[in-house]
Amino acid sequence: MPWKSLKLEVPEFKVEDDTECVMRNIMALEQCVYPFETYICNYVSFLDQLINTAEDVELLVEKKVVHNLLGSNDAVADLINKLCDQIVETSFCYGGICQVLNEHYDNFWNVTKATLKSVYFKDLWTSSSSIVALFVLLFSVVSVIASIKDMSSN
């Protein structure tokens, strides 16, 4: 999962009716035959760390990381969260990526920037109204300061 211009690229995960059965069998095979090369188990564990709720699934579907053929985002979240039960990981090849992601998330400025972008600048209309509101606030503050100076000089 390489970084491309500070963007995490994750291979698409297709979720259909038989995904749980297929993935459990692949993960069991991998743990029995290749116990020190558990790339599928690690990938599913990585997805498990990314997905906790239906909203997480919705975001990953929107970003084309998860292809949901089950219909319900809750069902996908439950499936991913249950896949790693009873799986013992001997090593986790995505540990470094998880650490970098957690450090990025724990940075106050990154969270603030993401919030501003998603809440106040998500589209043209929201951006425009946010900028206009900022200018109105700025002009109001300048007007109040000018009024106070004018009153104090009289």
Image (spheres, rainbow, N blue to C red):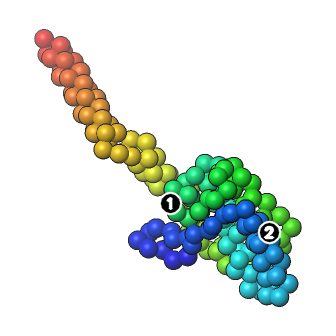
Q: In the image, is residue 71 above or below residue 23? A: above
Give the image location of residue 120, x and y in percent.
Answer: 38, 41
Give the image location of residue 35, x and y in percent.
Answer: 81, 85
Query: 102 or 14, which lies in front?
Result: 14
Query: 83 or 141, which lies in front?
Result: 83
Sort mark 1 into few (<14), some (14-19) or many (20+) by Cα contacts within 10 Å: few
Q: Residue at x 43, y 42 (%)?
A: 119
Asked which quadrant contains residue 13, the reply is bottom right
Q: Which residue is mark 2?
A: 21
Query: 66 or 118, which lies in front?
Result: 66
Asked which quadrant contains residue 126, the reply is top left
Q: In the image, is residue 152 above or below residue 44? A: above
Which image quarter is the N terminus in?
A: bottom right
Q: In the image, is residue 119 above or below residue 60? A: above
Amino acid carrying mark 1 in the image: Lys
Amino acid carrying mark 2 in the image: Cys
